[in-house]
């Protein structure tokens, strides 16, 4: 699985690059806003973006800011013409659907994807919330699609929270306790940690019991991703899947287990992927056990 960092902050991109694990970068207008706020005044955004492009060899997604077909195509071309010559690694991010309110149409994003892809500009079709949107984006020629795992979890978690009078914290996909209790009742015994993933992420039958615990038959962001992958595998689309809106290291593991092409991950989550309490304890024990004779050898 390729790892992209989901940030526009140069220090995070450079740090991840220095670990030798970075295959690309995704940005969006919100991430650029945050990066500029952090960098402070006086920074040339154009130079800043060019520096990001030089830092990574892999694809860097830059998103358009408009929502009309003509403006999206024009902005995408500006981004591509201005920045792709720097390191030949620009991908233009186009929302799959730019509808926001009455009067907007639902199809400018897909038309822009088709038009730009036909012109050889690689498109990352973003804000994908359903397997159907991912199917349409692939058919329109998108080089990448970005299903938003975390935002689907946000939606389902909020819905379940409202129903159950609870406020589930960000980072839970949906209340595990619910699925666990149902499953325990069914089995007539307690279940252990290792079984939890199977129940939450793979046993849709359980969650299907709860009409309000899904989004049109999708039971979590990871479930949505799984469905996108199944559709793509079925028809052998070339479009690569970028698991986006990742909130936890656990989601990254599930992406890797299902064989998703790419996960774009916030830097804070990439850091967490390296950490385990027992690794630190083991490290301390090994260091404490280095006897002087061994130390002599190690000095060379
Ligand atoms: C990347 O392509 C997306 O813009 C990003 O993953 C969105 O993440 P968020 O839902 O945490 O904002």
Image: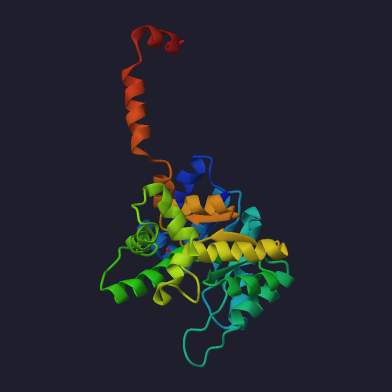
Residue 254 visible at all: yes
In the image, what residue occupies the spot 34% across and 11% down? 291
Q: Nearer the viewer, residue 32 or 113?
A: 113
Residue 58 in the image: above or below residue 276 = below
Residue placed most toward the observer, 241 or 104? 241
Residue 258 locus on image (x, y percent): 57, 54
The residue lying furthest to the front in this view is 188
**In the orientation shown, which residue stands out farthest toward the bottom?**
103
Image x and y of residue 158, in percent: 35, 72
**Closest to the observer: 260 or 197?**
197
**Is 168 or 80 nearer to us in this picture?**
168
**Residue 48 position in % (x across, y down):** 49, 57
Residue 255 in the figure: left or right of residue 74: left
Q: Is residue 216 above or below residue 255?
A: below
Q: Is residue 41 left or right of residue 225?
A: left
Q: Residue at x 45, y 44 (%)?
A: 15
Position of 268 compared to 86: left or right?
A: left
Residue 17 against residue 88 in the figure, above or below: above
Residue 8 shows in the view: no
The colour scheme of the drawn protein is rainbow
Q: How many marks?
A: 0
* Residue 273 location (% of width, % of height): 43, 45
Q: Quadrant of residue 163?
A: bottom left
Q: Residue at x 70, y 61 (%)?
A: 238
């Amino acid at each position: 699985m390729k790892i992209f960092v989901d940030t526009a902050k140069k220090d995070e991109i450079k740090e991840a690059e220095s670990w030798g694990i970075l295959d690309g970068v995704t940005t969006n207008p919100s991430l650029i806003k945050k990066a500029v706020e952090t960098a402070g005044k006086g920074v040339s955004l154009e130079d800043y973006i060019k520096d990001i492009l030089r830092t990574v060899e892999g694809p860097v997604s830059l998103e358009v800011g408009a929502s009309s077909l003509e403006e999206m195509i024009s902005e995408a071309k500006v981004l591509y013409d201005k920045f792709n010559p720097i390191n030949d690694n620009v991908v233009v991010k186009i929302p799959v659907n730019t509808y926001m309110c009455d009067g907007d149409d639902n199809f400018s994003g897909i038309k822009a994807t088709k038009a730009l892809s036909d012109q050889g500009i690689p498109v990352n079709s973003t804000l994908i919330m359903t397997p159907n949107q991912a199917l349409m984006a692939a058919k329109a020629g998108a080089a990448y699609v970005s299903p938003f795992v975390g935002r689907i979890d946000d939606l389902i978690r909020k819905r379940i929270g409202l129903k159950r009078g609870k406020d589930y914290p960000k980072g839970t996909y949906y209340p595990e306790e619910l699925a666990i209790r149902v499953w325990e009742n069914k089995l007539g015994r307690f279940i252990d940690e290792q079984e939890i993933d199977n129940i939450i992420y793979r046993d849709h039958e359980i969650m299907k019991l709860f009409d309000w615990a899904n989004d049109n038959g999708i039971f979590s962001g990871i479930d949505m991703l799984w469905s996108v992958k199944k559709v793509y595998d079925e028809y052998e689309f070339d479009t690569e899947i970028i698991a986006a809106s990742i909130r936890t290291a656990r989601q990254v593991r599930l992406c890797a287990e299902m064989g998703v092409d790419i996960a774009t991950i916030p830097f804070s989550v990439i850091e967490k992927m390296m950490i385990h309490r027992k690794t630190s304890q083991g490290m301390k024990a090994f260091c404490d056990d280095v006897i002087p004779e061994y130390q002599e050898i190690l000095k060379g």
